[in-house]
Image: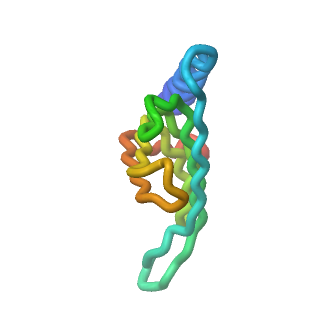
């Protein structure tokens, strides 16, 4: 029951984010990376991917809904939530970039 509720919540969030696409500028951020750490006394490196879909509030701030996939030893976690991305000086070619995410990680992909 909990898995179905989590999946239904994800679907509602994703469908809600598309309703504003015609009125505000749409943005999409894709992030991939390696999760490095230790498990059972051995070093590990695992894969992570995350996507933020939302709106550009102004040329410095983006806000949206995120969903991702993280692979750990013995677990596949699907994070979802809301996120903010900011650029200090977007007119420059190189600029400071920051992000803040708030959400939940679900193991809905596990049996």
Residue 101 lies, with reference to residue 32, above or below; the image says: above
The residue at 50%/61% (across/down) is: 94
The residue at 55%/20% (across/down) is: 24
Q: Locate residue 58, reporting x and y percent.
A: 44, 32
Residue 57 visible, this angle: yes
Quadrant in the picture for residue 40: bottom left
Count every numbered label the image shows and give the total: 0
Name the residue nearer the viewer: 9 or 74. Answer: 9
Residue 110 visible, this angle: no
Name the residue nearer the viewer: 4 or 30. Answer: 30
Name the residue nearer the viewer: 1 or 36. Answer: 36
Image color mode = rainbow
Query: Can you name the residue that lies furthest to the front here?
Result: 91
Report whether 7 appears left or right of 59. Answer: right
Quadrant in the picture for residue 108: top right
Report whether 1 appears left or right of 19. Answer: left
Q: Locate residue 79, reporting x and y percent.
A: 49, 45
Residue 69 lies, with reference to residue 20, above or below; the image says: below
The residue at 47%/37% (across/down) is: 59
Q: Locate residue 55, reporting x and y percent.
A: 52, 29
Residue 2 lies, with reference to residue 100, above or below; the image says: above
Q: Locate residue 7, reporting x and y percent.
A: 56, 29
């Amino acid at each position: 029951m909990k898995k179905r509720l989590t999946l239904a919540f994800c679907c509602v969030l994703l469908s809600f984010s598309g309703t504003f696409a015609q009125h505000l500028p749409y943005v999409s951020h894709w992030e991939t990376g390696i999760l490095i750490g230790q498990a059972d006394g051995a070093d590990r490196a695992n894969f992570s991917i995350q996507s933020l879909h939302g709106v550009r509030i102004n040329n410095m701030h983006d806000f949206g809904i995120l969903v991702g996939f993280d692979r750990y030893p013995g677990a596949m976690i699907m994070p979802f939530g809301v996120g903010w991305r900011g650029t200090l000086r977007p007119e420059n070619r190189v600029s400071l970039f920051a992000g803040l995410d708030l959400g939940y990680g679900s193991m809905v992909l596990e049996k």
